[in-house]
Every structure is written in structure tokens, then in C-alpha cells.
Amino acid sequence: MHSFQRSYSLEFPSKASLLMFCSSLLALGISGCRFGNYVERADTSAATDPITGYYAAQPTSLVFCAEKAVGSNTTTDCEEANTTEIPSDIRATMTNPVVLYLADSDGSGLILPNDGSDYGISTQFKSLSEIESVAQSEQSTLWLDASCKRTAFFQQVGTFAKNSSTLALDDPGSLSLTLTYYEVFDGDCEQTFSQIYACMNDATQCAEDPLNPTESTQELLQLQSGAENFLTPYLNAGVLSTGEFAQLRSFAFEVVYQ
């Protein structure tokens, strides 16, 4: 079966430093959740705490990066992109304004869209004015070939403030937030990326066995959409080309809200 989840700084760290960085934050108890479980339900109808409310969240910058092997070294290419290119799963939640919701006295909470939805991104409130959270997925097979593994990291760092006592939709507080998302790849992934790219361009190639597909048309189209969301932003940003799949070691995006 396919194992594909869709599910970012100008200086992109090496895999070793990234793992060390995330491990140190996790050891501090900031967040131990898996990235794949970031969608949760919240009840915001009767919130009376000092955090929950609306906060302005205008995206101001977006950067895509890709880290590639060059001989025994690695090189990182980063390019700025228009904020209209923010990946769809983040864009759907990070409306302007967003809702910050304090779920528990331990500081755990959610970032929610302003459309009344009770689903959002898990976060951690470090104080009454700071967000600091890191989530890490378990290592898993990226597509079909078990020799290609991926691990995802999702970091949120920022500050927020009340501009009034109401935090209402028409009188929101202010939010300054940086969201950084990393994918780290291990093993021989050239064939996997080539298969994902083929799936992007032809839904029939998304089947586990393209010559004898067992998936429904709807399932193939869903896989194709996932493939597009996974690779297209980096290809369009110019930080990755189809000829560099064998060298790709990690990629990332970072979006800043003010």
C-alpha cells in the first residue's frame, strides 16, 4: 500500500543538526505530538481565558528550500515565493484573522481558522504572549519503496498580544508567527521521487501497480493531488529540478505572519 502523507529559514540546517535541534526542544517538553496528528477538535463556545480570541495574521514572506548532496557535501538552494503559494493545508488554517485557543492549563492549544471550524493546528502557549512548539513525525516509508524513508518536523515560534479586551473578529489582537516545516529523507529515494513525479502528471501512474490498478478513480485522483501538493511548490520555486531527485536530502518551507 502507498504510504504518502503531505504532510521551513533561509539557512537550512543539516540533517544531523536538525535532528539534534528538534530533539533538544522535545526534551524540554515543548511538544511530543506527531505532526500527522495536528488536527484536533476544540470547543471554543464558552472560552473565558486570557488567550482565546481573534488575532490578525497577515502572511508577509514565504521561502522554499531544498538540501541536496554534492559529492561528500551538501548544498542548499532557497528561493522566496509569493505568499499565494503557501501550501494549501497551512493556508486553510491560517486565515486572517486566526483564532488562538487555549485548550488546557498546561498551555496546549490550537490555531484555528476564522470560519467557525473546530479543527486546527496543535500548538503550545509558552506564556500569555509566546508560542513555541515543535512536532515530529515518526519515520515512515515515503511512497511504496521501504528503502526510502521520511521524517517531518513542524515548528511554530512567535508572540501575540491583545489590542483590546475583547479579541473580537472586528477588533483582533496581533500575532507575529513563524511556521517552519521540514521533510528529511533517508535511504535511496530517487525512484520514489520519480514515481511521485509521474503520478503528478498522470493519475494512472499513482496506482501501486499501474499495469493492473486496483484503486478506484477517486483514490487515484486523491493520490495525484497529494503528489502535486508534495513536490510542486519546490519545483515551481526553482529550488528543485527533476534531475536532482537522486541528490535530494531534505526540503522545507518557512512562512512568516505579522
Image: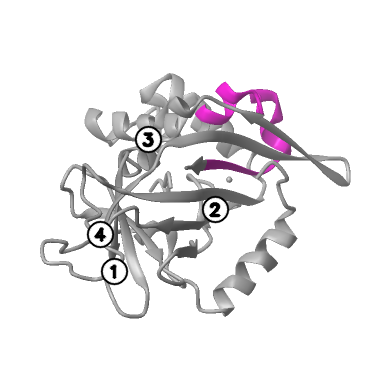
Residue 82: x and y in percent read 52, 24
Which residue in the structure is indicated by mark 4?
A: 165
| Spatial separation of the CA atoms under disc 2 and disc 1 | 47 Å
Q: Any mark on residue 50, and which?
A: 1
Q: Earlier in the sequence, mark 4 or mark 1?
A: 1
Q: Any mark on residue 88, and which?
A: 3
Q: Decide which of 20, 53 is in the foreground and name it.
A: 53
Which residue in the structure is indicated by mark 2?
A: 146
Disc 2 versus disc 4: nearer the observer: 4
| Spatial separation of the CA atoms under disc 3 and disc 1 | 30 Å
Q: Residues within 10 Å of mark 4 (few under 14, many from 20)?
A: few
Identity, as a three-letter code, of the amino acid under mark 3:
Ser
Identity, as a three-letter code, of the amino acid under mark 2:
Ala
Disc 2 versus disc 1: nearer the observer: 1
Disc 3 versus disc 2: nearer the observer: 3
Q: Which residues are magenta?
A: 233-255
Identity, as a three-letter code, of the amino acid under mark 4:
Ser
